[in-house]
Image (spheres, coloured by chain):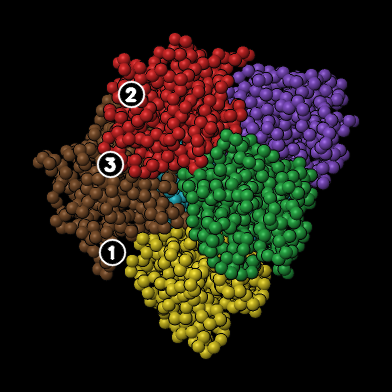
Chain colours: A brown, B cyan, C purple, D yellow, E green, F red
Amino acid sequence: MTAHAQRLAGTGRAIPWENRPAGTSDVMWRSSLNPIVTRDDVPGANSIFNSAVVRFEDGYAGVFRVDDTRRAMNLHAGRSVDGAAWELDPDPIAFTPGDDRVPEIQERFEHAYDPRVTWLEDRFYVTWCNGYHGPTVGLAHTTDFRTFAQLDNAYLPFNRNGVLFPRRIGGAYAMLSRPSDGGHTAFGDIFYSESPDLVHWGRHRHVMAPVPLSWQATKVGAGPTPIETDDGWLVLYHGVLTSCNGFVYSMGAALLDLEEPWRVLARGSRFLLAPHVPYEQVGDVPNVVFPCAALVDEDADRLTVYYGGADTVVCMAHAHLSEVLAFVRD
Amino acid sequence: MTAHAQRLAGTGRAIPWENRPAGTSDVMWRSSLNPIVTRDDVPGANSIFNSAVVRFEDGYAGVFRVDDTRRAMNLHAGRSVDGAAWELDPDPIAFTPGDDRVPEIQERFEHAYDPRVTWLEDRFYVTWCNGYHGPTVGLAHTTDFRTFAQLDNAYLPFNRNGVLFPRRIGGAYAMLSRPSDGGHTAFGDIFYSESPDLVHWGRHRHVMAPVPLSWQATKVGAGPTPIETDDGWLVLYHGVLTSCNGFVYSMGAALLDLEEPWRVLARGSRFLLAPHVPYEQVGDVPNVVFPCAALVDEDADRLTVYYGGADTVVCMAHAHLSEVLAFVRD
Amino acid sequence: MTAHAQRLAGTGRAIPWENRPAGTSDVMWRSSLNPIVTRDDVPGANSIFNSAVVRFEDGYAGVFRVDDTRRAMNLHAGRSVDGAAWELDPDPIAFTPGDDRVPEIQERFEHAYDPRVTWLEDRFYVTWCNGYHGPTVGLAHTTDFRTFAQLDNAYLPFNRNGVLFPRRIGGAYAMLSRPSDGGHTAFGDIFYSESPDLVHWGRHRHVMAPVPLSWQATKVGAGPTPIETDDGWLVLYHGVLTSCNGFVYSMGAALLDLEEPWRVLARGSRFLLAPHVPYEQVGDVPNVVFPCAALVDEDADRLTVYYGGADTVVCMAHAHLSEVLAFVRD
Amino acid sequence: MTAHAQRLAGTGRAIPWENRPAGTSDVMWRSSLNPIVTRDDVPGANSIFNSAVVRFEDGYAGVFRVDDTRRAMNLHAGRSVDGAAWELDPDPIAFTPGDDRVPEIQERFEHAYDPRVTWLEDRFYVTWCNGYHGPTVGLAHTTDFRTFAQLDNAYLPFNRNGVLFPRRIGGAYAMLSRPSDGGHTAFGDIFYSESPDLVHWGRHRHVMAPVPLSWQATKVGAGPTPIETDDGWLVLYHGVLTSCNGFVYSMGAALLDLEEPWRVLARGSRFLLAPHVPYEQVGDVPNVVFPCAALVDEDADRLTVYYGGADTVVCMAHAHLSEVLAFVRD
Amino acid sequence: MTAHAQRLAGTGRAIPWENRPAGTSDVMWRSSLNPIVTRDDVPGANSIFNSAVVRFEDGYAGVFRVDDTRRAMNLHAGRSVDGAAWELDPDPIAFTPGDDRVPEIQERFEHAYDPRVTWLEDRFYVTWCNGYHGPTVGLAHTTDFRTFAQLDNAYLPFNRNGVLFPRRIGGAYAMLSRPSDGGHTAFGDIFYSESPDLVHWGRHRHVMAPVPLSWQATKVGAGPTPIETDDGWLVLYHGVLTSCNGFVYSMGAALLDLEEPWRVLARGSRFLLAPHVPYEQVGDVPNVVFPCAALVDEDADRLTVYYGGADTVVCMAHAHLSEVLAFVRD
Amino acid sequence: MTAHAQRLAGTGRAIPWENRPAGTSDVMWRSSLNPIVTRDDVPGANSIFNSAVVRFEDGYAGVFRVDDTRRAMNLHAGRSVDGAAWELDPDPIAFTPGDDRVPEIQERFEHAYDPRVTWLEDRFYVTWCNGYHGPTVGLAHTTDFRTFAQLDNAYLPFNRNGVLFPRRIGGAYAMLSRPSDGGHTAFGDIFYSESPDLVHWGRHRHVMAPVPLSWQATKVGAGPTPIETDDGWLVLYHGVLTSCNGFVYSMGAALLDLEEPWRVLARGSRFLLAPHVPYEQVGDVPNVVFPCAALVDEDADRLTVYYGGADTVVCMAHAHLSEVLAFVRD
């Protein structure tokens, strides 16, 4: 990484953090600041949730899902000094075409939601659920979180939860995604795909399926950018259970092989976090914990996850990285 | 309007009101008295919601949806001095037959719910969802809110959300309704119908459909009696979005042509009010804002809407009429 | 009936007929000429079926459902000397507006199918399934089967199988119909409605429901114009059973009270005709017998029914009227 | 009952109790201690609910449904001095085979949930929803709540909510159950079955069905062990209504004939308790009141019911037995 | 077996037979006499199919599914000299109560269909799909095919395709069945149950499930009485595939352990017979081959199967027993 | 094209042909040889249909869908001298890995069906519906129809009906496909995708959607390899209508822009061929005409289409190319 890139990527600083509350031994715990972003942070917003945050320069930057009072879904950029208090742009990101074929898909804007942000080589890439005759995975890059150059969609519809790996693997760009249908999909496995150019994708490999009779029985989808560790790629993801009254979204973790990430090395049988407090249980979609980003401070053994609560607010949770790695193998 | 009718209709008085709270620019805001009616207001009630209120004599009168602890659905009359504190009759309205054919449909009572009340010519008319081999639109009239004379059902099943216009249009009585099915209908457009006699209905016209990818993507149904303005008929209505965990009911507004009300002159792309506070988010049906009545004080530019919260309680919200008319055209 | 009307209605002549085949005691039997109309009778037709036939002047006239090779559904007029060999107009009927409000619904043509034709007072009325934001019942009149004046739709969507009675009852026009939904409805009861003017309809009464665990377990819908007899109105209708592989449409019969036709006097527990031969079992919709018209020769005790086979062809079946009346009471 | 059995069954002592709160005339009221058991009572639990409690020796014992953070469902034993404060075993019950054929079904453990406990002749029997190629009714017995001997499943899948009667009836063991399907069943009637040996079951009789257009319109299932009274068997049960946003579970009551319990003598048309407070409205399954056990102090005319709230916590409610018996006949 | 029983059971005679047609090597082939029974064999029948045949005295007897022109489903007895030409009783079997509790279930007749007949100890037992608040398994016995004594239903609803074994196993009566739901079930595994008295059933064991991506992917259900061979119980069964246009029913075979019949020793991966000729492809339910009975002549190595075609007719197919046993292991 | 390639591709010879039958003016007509391939052509086959044919050397070669009597779906190669009489290999194609990453997907064979074959640059490419955790598009190449080298799947599941263009467009390989779900998909649009290497795919563009109220109202999918004409790419495709009894598959035609094939230049509103004869109406899936291949003799203005009938047999139909091009613009 060049010095310029290092500065952009904001590496090497501490991350937002609270110690584990006394009296609990949970592997992951909630921030006392939750919810850290609400509808009041953008004029005309109905809800802000399922958003992605990265270190950026001397502070933090992010891409946020903002549903307005039309219930139109858009992405807004935001900045923060400490990763917990955020200023969001009042207007959605206006993507510029990243090449001369991209306007063909920009003509038809349906929606943009559930972003992820990944530092890859020399810039940040945003992936999100982009509507083009149905949901698929949109892709864009930025270096300043002001201008975003949109690339072509990665897949045909119907797909969601596209998450880039933070480096090439075997020479190829790599992405996780969750093929689905056009509705509130009641199924969903995680797949792995490769690309030589971030435009054309192939070598699709199955990674992992739901687990019957568990918290992740209905569908699973990748959350934050995979975290490279000596043990493998740590993937935090959402798993969904269908209760008598609809879907319950919880957060879990798995380890993928470093060089062949479609091979699952370990996978936690338990959830890390499930909707147990009011801002996760009550809102536009009750009972949702939906992780989209993570910050790691390896030296301090700290992990901070950003997740959406009840499809209504943005929240943080903390854990020790070493404990999560042990949890996955439990 | 005769003097007698004027007194009955209770025109010309102020309406319940609170000013817009400091620090918000929302077009519509909630009453600090919410919820104004709860299950405690009728012995044996499970819930009271989706109810209709009008000015009456020196105060206010209303018809309320009361689900009892059988979960049987009935209509109760109620009275109020100030429009906010209500006394409800402990027993359901016992409709008398309005003509000699009506007993044929009264033999089979299934349920009565979601009333609207309209002053029309010389009396009040109540419309509601009346069960007769499936839901359809019931019709009755009263001058004293003690005796109610029931007319024949307006339509074949399946239909709901029948709302009368407050005057004849083109010489005919006029009603909005929402054809549906026998269950928790996942579709629904608003239609307009005419009648020479309030018994036989025809000239059915399509008014408006749901809007894809919006807060009103699944179905729409008229709410309070349409409000006549210089700009057209102001219709407040509910729109429904299907989330991952069921329906979300919000309130919106549209303007219809004064003489050909099936022509939509303008329609707000945003919602006016969506379920954002606990008494709208938690209850027998989470996430419901369902408007059924409105009071207007034109001189003061004030509008007060009565709506059901979470299919459990009755609430009020306020707005300036001029701002709503601007909002519709936004 | 005036002499002019008598000539129009073509009363008093024999009807197409074959005697009951030897060796069977079935109450109804198929014509050896079946199918009497096929796709070859109209250039560009995919299928011709579910059509209505009446005596007209010295021969017969009819309104036919013709699906073209776009699978667009239209009505075509046809004429016949003997009621069995038909000449169909190559172009669909172009309805003229019957009053100045009708163009409002004609702007939006979706489809026209499953016609019935009824002689009423001084002219022929056609009813059919007319698309207007979903299926409903269209209405038109003619005296020459060349020009057809369209009236307003009788009902809100969703409704099908509207069939007029051939005289006023209790001073009102009367119609049977089957409220439904917008798809391939898996339910359906027959209702009765009245009108003072053939435009506005009310006094809706429930007539009859499907019969569980029978050939008519899923839905029932009226077929030909009700036939007035001393015993009551004879209604031939279709009943549908849902098999492991979809709907099976058969024909049955019932008797309704002459003055209060929503009262069922008798109803055959068996079907009169079910899809038992290839032209009823194989085609665009396998296993369909769908009656739309009947001719009666009372003096000869003869009844000839026109029905669609497999949504593909037009067929005839014969019976003795007295035997059908006995069958209904069996 | 022998002295040993009397001691085991813990008869003759007072039960947990609070008097009816001032200002209400409800037949049943909630404990101010609610929720009495939460996820914090078992390490690694996601939720504890739908559990069964009996008098045992000098205090109380129970079998609890504990879903862990895998969302695996298991049964845990627990003990209490006062019936309100509970100590639960941290590990699930390890059933021993009750005869030499039982290991055949134990090989395949899917899940164990929604227990009931019944004192019958000389020991306690536990029934629960046991997974064996789908849900069915498991059966075990214990005298010490430490070792539990499992018998064969009572029925083929798919069945749930099996509840034993506390004595033989007509010489046979007797059980209520609710045949269902393999999913979140949207239907369900209560049936009665008999057995000579607690292994083979027959003489299945229909007891009661849902009631259309009521709080129990979708399905009904027995709750606590039936309570023998002079008036008949008092059965507390759950009834389910399907709202616009899923199932709502409430508690009701019925009286069955003492000797022919498939005959319903009386059945309350109203619910006794419905989800009206946050711990019943918000949780893993919103809007659930699910009774599984009851304690009776006949001398004091007191009834205490244990029920699950929102599929998340265990709660208590109180009533006077005589008032419930009157309520059922109301 | 006593001499009387031997005579009743008609053992030791040849069975209907045709040699394999030249030019085919199929393991099973159709009779040139097909269909052997049609609707013409019972006055007022709509269809006759899915029927069971046994040797009886000097010829053959059978129980036939006859759907009448109400589409009511009943069982009729029949007799034959040669097993191919049949005389059927014109009236349904009138079951007499086999014990004093049976009238309780006979009060409510819903339907009787898909019979099987088994010689067991000293008489013939009939099992069938008996309606009692949903489909379940009815049971009756006869020695003369004139009087049939009905026993209690074997199971709670919902169950179908109950087939008795022809001898006790491990001292118990034994039956295969297929638990299902109340509709056109889209799933279904075969289970095994035991009984000490033919009234109470228990020890339910899973036998076999559908096979994904095969002709038996949707559901499987036992057909004829299991055939005891040295290799195990030979079970012919139906397997169902869901095509783009509904279910396709084919016939397959499996071998079960003689003493523990819930253990599958071998199971053919291919179908023996699938709907390939018009009388199996066209009818009330297109594409159905449904076996219900088999005759074996061990000395001649001959097997004749009776099966229903298209839910409309009765057919026969032939095979060499030794080849079927090899096919199962293929 | 090199001489070697020309010989391989078999260009320049006449194609199977019959003139239009007298008395019809249909644009497309059936071969009198139909069906040209049946289950009898491969031992152990249940059905052979939906297959692809090309000119090859001095005759013809093809890849055929063969469902065996397990109902397993495989591809078999075949050869023909005249294009009408075929010899099929008795064993399925055994694909060799085309590169060293392909074995990863070959480990998991689910099914292979509905092939297309395209001559592209210097060899034949086969595309088909390949099962890999759900249906997706498989890809292989051959020069001799004996060995086939499999490449990676083109897309993530769920996708079907992948059809390659016969030359690069704008420098990229190009394919049509129809994203779907994992079942009997009730929706489906045609999309266009590009690839630099036949492994990685991107630049996905929407091409065309179903047409409401028409023969192609439910879904559309490309059929034969697109045919390059001066007017554009001629695409023959299947369109599906949902009738009361399931899907009806017909054949239609459209013209795509030569350089931007996602732009539709013209599209026939009518079908070219619909299931009107028994071998299309009766079989494993009634009412299916499914085109997979076409041969063109431009000099003679002849077009011969190969299509599947009723998911059971292979058929041919003929047309004049110039008339089809006119039909598309009609």
- Residues at marks 2 and 1, CA–CA distance in whole angstroms: 60 Å
- Residue depicted at 27% across the width and 59% down the height: A329
Q: Chain of mark 2?
A: F
Q: What amino acid does circle 1 point to?
A: Asp
Considering only order in the chain, which callout, 1 or 3, is on the residue closer to the N terminus? 1
What mark, if any, has residue F123 been given in the picture? 2
Between residues D26 and B230, which one lies in front from this camera angle?
A: D26
Residue annotated with mark 3:
A175
Under circle 3, the secondary element is strand
Closer to the camera: disc 2 or disc 1? 2
Most distant residue in the front direction? E299
Task: Judge whether D166 appears above or below E278 on screen.
Answer: below
Give residue F21's position: percent from left, percent from top.
Answer: 59, 15
Q: Nearer the viewer, mark 2 or mark 3?
A: 2
Instruction: Name the secondary structure under disc 2.
Output: strand
Amino acid at the residue labelled 3: Met
